Image: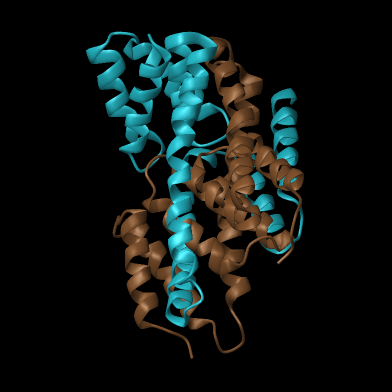
Amino acid sequence: MNLVVLYLLLVKATLTSFSGLASLPMVRNDFVVRRHVLTDRQLNTAVAAGRIGPGPLGIYVVSVGFLVDGAPGAAAGWLAMITPAFLIIPMLRFLGARAEHRRARAIARAVLFAGAGLMASAAVPLARDAITNPLSLGIFAVSFLLIAGARVDSLWVMLGAALVGVAAFQF
Amino acid sequence: MAHPRLIDVTRLFARVGVTVFGGGDPTIAILQREFYRRSWLSPEKFAIAFGLARLTPGTNVLAFCAASGWYILGIAGALAAVLAITIPASVLVVWLTSAYDLTAHNRLALSIANALLAAAVGTMIGAALLLVRTQCKPGRWLRPVAISLGAFLLAYAARLTPLQVIGVATVVGFFWVEQ
């Protein structure tokens, strides 16, 4: 498949969705149903690879690009994934001049507090998947305490968790 | 606010990009916590970046990275943030795709991924609590607590989408201005 077409199809899917996996139906329609350049099994592999690795869920489009056209395809997928992100800059420029207004600051702070509530609510379904035994409960509790109560760099929290994962496998 | 160097910004986003599992929400939680720890971004600018990222098409967390990078170091910061958070993770996802049948059933890899996911959940809730706690001043705690708790209930119990919750928060913020 032509790389430009690959990029345009993927960017169409990312531009018309508002979260990581919301582009999946359009990607499936274009690549599996209409053009037959991917199978459903390959698309599932792309989604699964995106889910087991770090980073945003939308990273699966890089995997889709790779499965369609190797490394150049992965680069096209990566470009399609990051392109919409920069649309936020004109919006920030527009808001910048108005952000110091008292009422605008009050709205920003309300959105900030809502963000905390949203983070907590997004953690609940993740917690159901992640906390399945006493060990994962312990990792959760220690991470929570270190992040909320101490000024520990989050890198050490993640590295510590990874080491516990290795130790759990060994024993 | 501190003025970090481009290399420091790049390093932070690259590090978060390869160490945080569970998608965009844990990533934003970790970044918020690191911005706060380093005094790189004010709570107001974080809120604008967070809110507008939900309105931007595509992967929300990448729009958030572009916005926070732009606030910290302008266009160079936005580019560094988006490239640093996506390139190492993309290389990793390509490797995972090509080795999927091996890695998906590897018990060591699964054990590490499960531990990292549990840590990501603890981090998210910890960062949310920290965010509210740092904004609560003596005699001025009702607004942060009420809005964050209300947002949690709207998202979790009433099943409103994040965009709808932010819309409600915007209306509340417009009418409920602290003196």
Q: Which chain is brown?
A: B
In the rendered view, tell whether residue B98 sits above or below residue A155: above
Left-right relation of A104 to B89: left
* Residue B10 place in picture, x, y as percent: 70, 42
Location of the N terminus of chain B by quadrant is bottom right
- Most foreground residue, B159 or B28: B28
**Residue at 28 percent of width and 27 percent of height:** A26
Res A137 visible: no
Evaluate whether residue A26 shows in this view. Answer: yes
User: Residue visible at 28% across and 8% down?
Assistant: A36
Where on the picture, by quarter, is residue B146?
bottom left
Which percent across, then down, holds residue A156?
A: 76, 45
Q: Is residue B23 above or below residue B143?
A: above
The image position of residue B43, as x and y in percent, is 58, 67
The one of A73 and A48 positioned closer to us in this rendering: A73
Query: Whole-percent x and y of residue A10?
Result: 37, 25
- Tell me what hue chain A is rendered in: cyan
Q: Colour scheme of this structure image?
A: by chain
In the displayed structure image, the side of residue A14 where residue A25 appears, left or right? left
